[in-house]
Each structure stands twice: as C-alpha cells, then as structure tokens.
Amino acid sequence: MPDFEEKTQVEEIDRSLYDFKDKVDADLILDSGLTRKIVETISEEKNDPEWMRQFRLKSLEYYNSLEIPNWGPPIDGLDMDNIVTYVRPKGAMHAKWEEVPEDIKNTFERLGIPQAERASLAGVGAQYDSEIVYHNVKKEVAAQGVIYTDIESALRGPKADLVEKYFMKAVPPTDHKFAALHGAVWSGGSFVYVPEGVSVEIPLQSYFRLNAPGAGQFEHTLIIVEKGAYLHFIEGCSAPKYNIANLHAGCVEIFVGEDARVRYSTIENWSKNMYNLNTKRAIVEKGGAIEWVSGSFGSHTSYLYPMSVLKGDDSRMEYTGITFAGNGQNLDTGAKVVHIGKNTSSHISTKSISRDGGISNFRSEVIINKNAVDSKSAVTCESLMLDDQSRSDTIPVSDIRNSRVDIGHEARIGRISEEAIFYLMSRGLSEDDAKALIVGGFAEPIAKELPVEYAVEMNNLINLEMKGSIG
Amino acid sequence: MTERINPIQMLTWNHLNVNEAGKEFKLAVVPEGGFGKADITITKEAGASAAVTYGEIPSVCGQTISGVGELFDEYVKKNANCVYSLVADGDDGMVREDLRLTKDAQAAVVLCGIHAKAGSKVSLMQVLRSDEDVEGLAASLTQIYAEKGSEVRLIQVSLAGDKSRRWNGLAIDEEADAHVDVIRVELGAETSAVGSRSRLTGDNSDYSIHTVYFVDGKRFADFNDTAEFYGKETHSEIHATGVLAASAHKVLRETVDFKRGSVHAVGHEGEDVVMFGDEVVNKTTPLILCGEEWVEGQHAATTTQLDERMLYYLESRGLSPAEAKRIMIDAKICPVTDLIPDESIRDEIAANVGRRLDLIDEFNV
C-alpha cells in the first residue's frame, strides 16, 4: 500500500510554443465594453446587410435581459466593461500566405498552419483577433462546388440566402447570455457549404489566434452539408497569456443533411487567462451523423458542451472528448444530445485529467423525446486525478420520455493504478515516464480519432502539461 | 438556510429542472393549532434491547442535514406530532414504527433519532400505510448517529395510498468502523420527496442504501441520496431499482462526494429502471464529486425495456406474457425486498406491486 503522505510535485510548465505575443498593431480597436453604439459601429465596419444589423441589436437586448449562469464555474473575473469586442488587424483577407502581413504570417508559421495546409488540408482559414486574414481552398475541392470562405464574404456572396436562413437558427441568441453576446458582436469565422453527394476527402481547417490583450473573439462558423455529403472540419485555437482576462464566445452551427456525415475536431489551447464560453450545435437530419472530437487543454475557465439535435429518424451522434485541467484552470466540458427522431443513437465518451489544483467538470445532458422510440444512448466518463489539490466532478443528467429505449451511463473516477506504475518501472521505466505513458494511454482513444498530425499535436500538449508535473 | 426540497449537491443547467424538487413537493401548510395527533405505534420485538424514549432526540443526532434539505428538517423539528428516539447500547433486535394515515389522523410529522452507541447493533423498520381515499400527509425525518463500530439497519416501507403526500428525510453521521444499511421501498403516495445524506466521518465507516420504487398513475417521486466521504477507507453503495408506468414523473439524484483526505474511499452508485408507457418522465442525475485522488468512484445506470429474448424464452416455457413480465420485474426488485425480515411485509409489497402491474395495459399484452 503506498504511503498516504506521498504527494505529487508540480512545476511551472513551458508553454512558449504557443505563448508568444505580437505587438498590437491593429487597424481599428473599438472601446472596451458593450453598448448599442459599439454594436452599431461593428455592424457599420462590417457593412452588414440590414437584417444582420437588426439581428445584432436584438441580440444586445437579449444580452441585457439574460442572467449570468448560476450553475457553472465562477466567471467573476470576466468584466465585459474591460473587454474589447472588436480588433481589426491590418490588411484585408488574402488567399496567399505571401500577401498576409509579415508579423501575422510569422505567427501562423510558428503555429505550423501553412505547413499543415500544404501537407494535409483541403483548405485553411486563419483568423487573427476579430477578422479572417487568410482563406483558401484547394481548386479541386472548390471545383466540386464546395464553398469555404469567411462568413462576411458569404453574407454578400451567392449563398447569402443560405446564411440568412441558417445564421443562429441552431443556436438562437435567446439560448443563453453569451449566445446573445455573440449575436450582438460576432466577427470573423467561416462558412462551409458542401453540395449534395460530395465527399471532401481531406479536412478543412480554421485556426483562431487572439493576440490583443483584453480582447474578445467572437467568430461564427456556419457549416451546411447537404444530403449524402461528407466533411471533416478541424478547428484550432491559441493565444498568448496576459495578466488580464480575454474572452472567447464563438459559435459553431452545423446543419447535417439526410444521410450526410460531419466530423468536427477541435484542439483547444487557449492561454490560461482566457474565458472560453463557446457554443457549438449540430442539427442532424434523417440518417445523418455528427461526430465531435474535442481536446480541451487551455483557457482559464471553459464552458463547452457541443450539442447535437438528432432531428431525423436513424440519425446519430458521437462525442469523443478529453479535458486536461492544470493549475488555475476550471474547465467545465461535456456534451448534450436531444433525440427527436426514431431509432436515433448517441455515444458520449469522455476522459478528463486534473492535476496541480486544476478543476475538471464533466457535464452532460441526454434527452430522449416522446417520439424517439427505439433510440439508444450510451455515456461513459472516466476521470483521472493526479494529486489531491485538484478536483474532478461528474454531473450527468438524462431525461427520458418514452419506454422503448436503451440508455446506459457509466462514470468512473480514480487515480493512476499503482500496480501499472510498478509494472512499468519493473520493465525499466522511470516513475515519471511510467506515469506519462499511462496518461498517454488514457488519452489514446481520443488521439486515434484525430488525423495523425493533430494526434501528434494533442500528444505534445499532454506531454507539455505532464512535463514536470508528476513525481 | 436553503429553502429548496431535495437540493442537488452541485447545480447544473436550470432548464433540466433537476436542481431541486418541483413545486409539487412544496411543504404542506401547517394548520392553526398544529397537525393534531398521529396514528403511530412503536413496538419492540422480542429480544430488542434498544431503549425507546418519547418526546426527545439524543443531542448527538441531527448534526447532518437530511437529503430533503434544511427547510424540511426545520419544518419537522418545529411541527412534529410524534418525536421518539432509540438508544442502542447492546446487541440487535428489531423495533417497529407503524404509521397510518386515517380519516381521524390525516397528518403525521415524525421526528425519530437513533443513537447507536459504540459496538451496538440496532434495527428499525418504519412502515407507512394509509386508509383508502385519505388525503393525508406524512413527513418523517430520521436522524442517525452511529458511534464507533456500531451497526444500524433501517428498513423503510411506504405503502401509502395514492392520495397521500410524503416527505422522507434521512440524516446520518458515522464514526469509525460504523455501518449503516438502509432498505427503502417506495410504492405509494401521490408525491414522494425522499432524500438521505450520510456523513462518513470515521475511518472505515460504511453506508449502503438500496431503494425499490414503483411510480405509476399521475404520481411524482423525487429522490436525493448523498454519501459524503471524510474518513479514510470509507465505503458507500447507493443503488435504486424502479418501475415507472403511465404518467409517472420521477427524478433521482445520487451523489458520492469525496472530500479531501478521504483516501482509499470507495463509492458506487447505480440505477436500473424499467419503463412502461410513453407519458413517463424519467430523470436521473448521478453525481460524482471528487476532491481526493486516492479514491474509487463509480456510477452505472440503465433504462431499458424488458429483454425480449428473455420474455420469449419464458413464454416458450409455458408462461403467459404477463407472468413472464412479472417474473422479470420480481427478479429486479426481490433481491432488495427479500432482505426485509418480516414475511408479511414482503407479501404486502408483492401484492402491491402485482396490483400496480395489473393496471399497466402493455404489461398484459
């Protein structure tokens, strides 16, 4: 039996790979705070159509009337009066990396985005503070009728009617306070349209970088995948660390057509002064499928629960997620699913790791409606505690409204098996290496759901978080 | 003071309506002059050694707030029309509390304290019944203090009529090596708010609660069971097995809460539900809260239909569909109800379950 007094030692980790700052050299920085004037200025700057201007102003009304959530991690450190909602970087959006301003281009090169585009992506969008600075899609993909562009261009492009039809219909601004905030001040993000029957064989990626201190990023991603089509979309994000709060309140809306399939992968690595209050939702039609793969490593506080609405019969969802909460982090993550159609199925599988005083909460919601007969749902949640300074809480809810269902939920919490460490050490590994190997194995089911380059990035992040944190 | 009934241990999304029991469970207004006299009988079976005292509760009891909540506990303490306690200082023996809601005694607000002294054993069976058509109310708060090495066994059976309202709170404190086992059968009442909280402060203390429920008709049931682990090598099992039918509405919260320092604690919780009918609302919220690394917490819950292959097999052996289904339901609940030492109570439970199953249309198809 190990000594109860033996405790984990934790050291500060090196995040310099992501934690580098550019001098803020923006074209336009609005005043901090949130007022009607600021919302109108954003709308004017972005040359919104009238319906969008009205939408923003209505969302501001909702924002002012909605309460801050009373159930999640504290967000007292977030003062909207100190958040700048719009920072426009220098220069217009470009389709060639060479044309992107030097300092911004250097940032994305350090993050490996242009290299990834060349090696393994069908298209890339890169957002710097409030605006997209680079967007490109491979010619052969565009030739299939796939549209991948910044959402502002889409608002005025040939699919403008689709944007108006779908924008914030899956996540209405009345949904919660930060959805309303998003509706009022959104800026940047991507629009993806995949026509019927088209399979985008290699992924598209959007990468979001927030450089300005005290700023918010409110990008909107709208994905429409028509009947029988397929898309893998990857989202990455990072920011340098400042001593003041930054805010990310993005929104992702995915409309999955009949028999279509969408995989949405995220490696979230915001800096540890970031409040990440992001909303993601998919509406899935008959026979369609949404697959979420999510790695949450960064941010000071996260509220992140991708939601799937299984509207059509025989539709399905999978959520595979990992959360790694370290010192000073309170990451509240999980997933939601609503079964509406018949014979729908959902599978939520999560892992969480807490260390060095970090708090990791798993929260889920499974709703089976009255007409969703013959539906199935399985939720599994495993949590690993690496020391007694940390916390890990599991808060799942199921709400079942018909009897012809099979619903299962399993949760497990514990620490690294001493027997496994002992075995690995008996094979010649040091204790640190043994623990790192076990944590890597714990995360492996998530890594294998990602393209290899991103699985490598995720493993690097785990190693970064683990470095010096165990002993 | 929280004014909520059956408050959840950690809040979640408000739209799910699981953070506390709904308005259906609001405490009854106290009539002018109080609730009058309760129809309650306390009897000691042969060999029972615990001392029964009326009108007072041992001072060690009630250090913990019950699972139903602080508002409820204060309500019972203030308005009880029966207060009694058991003090055990020796070996086992069953004490029975028989409570009946009648036309002349429609309300019972009962405060019960159990003080199990070091190394003692005590058993209490609380049975609630009501006369047919009585719109009664029963609010019971049982506070247990289990000293070092003591064993407390509590059996609670509600056979209240479907027009009655019920609140049943349980608050437990355990010293080292103490064991508290609870068997709870909730079959009746129009609304039932039931909640337990056990504080496992002593090393190697142990708490188990096994619940069987049957909620049918337009009835509401709300459960809220929590084990808080403070001591080292503490252990808890919280399990529920239930049948929901017709327009039943059920919320079940189970929580294992590992406090820092509860090294090598083990907490398991689970629920197994069978549903009949498409008007049922079945909500389950199993929480694992963890502030200590050296623990094992597990939860498993299933909501299923009866296994069609098993039904087919039983029918192929000559059983009618209803008989086959009855056997499968019995297989789920009997492992718990068979632990009740009184055969007549077991028979009463079986008859009650049988009567309710007969009312389910699809059960008889």
Image (cartoon, coloured by chain):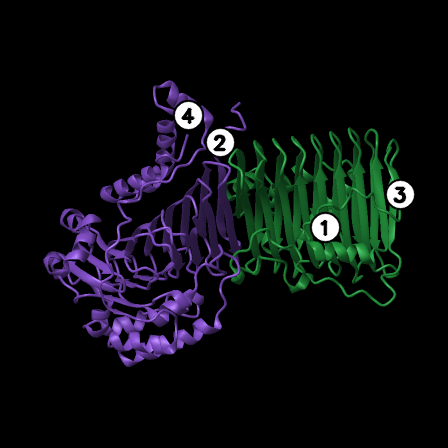
Q: Which quarter shows the C terminus of chain A?
A: top left
In this view of the protein, which residue sits in the foreground, A116 or A222? A116
Residue B23 location (% of width, % of height): 65, 64
Q: Earlier in the sequence, mark 3 or mark 1?
A: 3
Q: Nearer the viewer, mark 4 or mark 1?
A: 4
Q: Amino acid at mark 1?
A: Gly
Subunit of label 1: B
Q: Which residue is mark 3?
A: B53
Left or right: where does residue A314 sit relative to residue B85?
A: left
Chain identifier of the purple chain: A
Q: Which residue is mark 4?
A: A421
- The image quadrant that residue A215 belongs to is bottom left
Q: Amino acid at mark 2?
A: Lys
Q: Amino acid at mark 3?
A: Thr
Chain identifier of the green chain: B
Q: Amino acid at mark 4?
A: Ile
- Does B240 sit above or below residue A42? above
Residue B238 location (% of width, % of height): 62, 41
Q: Nearer the viewer, mark 3 or mark 2?
A: 2
Subunit of label 4: A
Q: Nearer the viewer, mark 1 or mark 2?
A: 2
From this viewpoint, is residue B10 visible? yes
Residue A3 location (% of width, % of height): 53, 25
What is the spatial separation of the Cα atoms under label 4 and label 2, in whole angstroms?
A: 15 Å
The dot on residue A7 is 2
Q: Which residue is mark 1?
A: B169
- Does B64 sit above or below residue B278? above
In this view of the protein, which residue sits in the foreground, A233 or A333? A333
Q: Earlier in the sequence, mark 4 or mark 2?
A: 2
